[in-house]
Image (cartoon, helix red, strand yellow):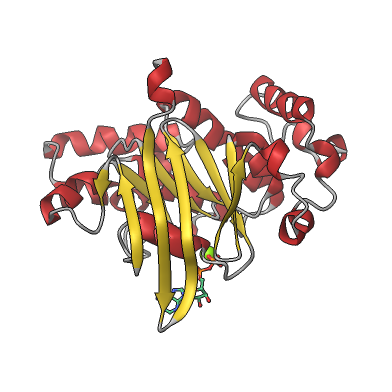
């Protein structure tokens, strides 16, 4: 990646106001996400995080302001342009949103079949490749979503989000509802994929360990706008009540060296074999 592309803006939210039935959710909200970075979005329940993701996906339209993705203004591009932009991003919605009547294979294959962009005999190798990439076995392809653990559902959803080889990935609370071990394994997977695929990621999360492990910058959504946006170690020290509460009990870990050490130790551990020692609660103190 060249130096200039590092700061290329992939997402530009400019002065956005969003309201539902006169109830204002975002007011004069600004946010820029650069190519190759992992941006976390944190904020209280009901503060408008999912709505902001939906704005970025073109699923909601702001009352005022503009949203540009890959340089395309969302509200104003022609339907055909929007379609083209859409295939450059993948989404993992909050609840995984797999189709329960479809097998794992068919869930992951769905975007390929809808788009019809690859010859039918390529679908199988591509789906199996994505399943392997997220740590699932070929046998898992035959299962139904109801036969999967929470962690596996997230992996299948991630495989589906990645099947069209997107440059940009949106994740809404990807570790919510997972047991701590599955959450940690999932975060490790995200880290690996981010390194392998050079993805730009926008992720809503409540999970401080997720922030430690993968995030480059943190945006705080509070008081209807992005109150602050910067490296974790800086944002964690903001004297704002929401931020203080969010990092309560974690602040002492937010020294830059601690974050680096945490990440390095993640690299040392193998994919298999349960939870790496560094990820156990007692090693985090
Ligand atoms: N389609 C909608 N119609 C009306 N109100 C909505 C809609 N979507 C979200 N809201 C409201 O907007 C606020 C923010 O919701 P949301 O973005 O889901 O919050 P968060 O993800 O931060 O918990 C909530 O009060 C929610 O009830
Ligand atoms: Mg939400």
Viewport quadrant of the C terminus: top right
Which residue is situated farthest in the bottom direction here? 21
Question: Horizontal placement of 228 versus 133: left or right?
Answer: right
Question: Horizontal placement of 89 versus 18: left or right?
Answer: left
Total marks placed: 0
Residue 126 appears in which quarter of the rendering?
A: top left
Percent coordinates x, y for residue 84 in the rendering = 18, 45
Question: Horizontal placement of 161 versus 118: left or right?
Answer: right
Viewport quadrant of the N terminus: top left
Nearest the eye: 259 or 72: 72
Residue 36 appears in which quarter of the rendering?
A: top left
Which residue is situated farthest in the top direction here? 2
Percent coordinates x, y for residue 186 in the rendering = 58, 42
Q: Residue at x 21, y 39 (%)?
A: 123
Residue 247 shows up from this direction: yes
Q: Residue at x 43, y 48 (%)?
A: 170
Nearest the eye: 189 or 203: 203
Percent coordinates x, y for residue 275 in the rendering = 71, 36
Percent coordinates x, y for residue 214 in the rendering = 59, 35
Nearest the eye: 239 or 250: 239
Instruction: Tell me if residue 285 comes above or below residue 26 in the rendering.
Output: above
Q: Residue at x 67, y 31 (%)?
A: 273
Residue 146 shows up from this direction: no
């Amino acid at each position: 990646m060249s130096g200039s592309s590092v700061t290329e803006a992939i997402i530009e939210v400019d002065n956005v106001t969003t309201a539902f039935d006169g109830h204002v959710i975002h007011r004069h909200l600004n946010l820029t996400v650069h190519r190759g970075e992992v941006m976390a979005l944190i904020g209280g329940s009901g503060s408008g995080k999912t709505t902001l993701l939906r704005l970025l996906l073109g699923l909601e339209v702001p009352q005022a302001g503009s949203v540009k993705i890959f340089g395309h203004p969302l509200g104003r591009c022609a339907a055909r342009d929007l379609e083209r932009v859409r295939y450059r991003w993948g989404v993992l919605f909050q609840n995984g949103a797999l189709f329960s009547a479809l097998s794992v294979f068919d869930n992951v294959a769905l975007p390929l079949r809808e788009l019809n962009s690859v010859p039918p005999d390529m679908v199988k190798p591509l789906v199996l490749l994505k399943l392997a990439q997220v740590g699932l076995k070929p046998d898992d392809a035959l299962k139904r979503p109801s036969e999967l653990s929470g962690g596996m559902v997230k992996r299948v959803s991630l495989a589906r989000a990645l099947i069209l080889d997107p440059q940009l990935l949106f994740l809404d609370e990807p570790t919510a509802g997972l047991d701590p071990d599955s959450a940690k394994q999932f975060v490790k997977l995200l880290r690996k994929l981010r390194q392998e695929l050079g993805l730009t990621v926008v992720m809503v999360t409540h999970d401080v360990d997720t922030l430690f492990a993968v995030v480059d910058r943190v945006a705080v959504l509070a008081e209807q706008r992005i109150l602050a946006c910067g490296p974790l170690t800086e944002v964690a020290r903001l004297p704002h009540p929401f931020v203080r509460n969010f990092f309560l009990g974690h602040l002492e870990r937010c020294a830059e060296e601690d974050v680096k050490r945490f990440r390095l130790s993640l690299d040392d551990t193998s994919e298999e074999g349960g939870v790496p020692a560094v990820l156990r609660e007692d090693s985090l103190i």
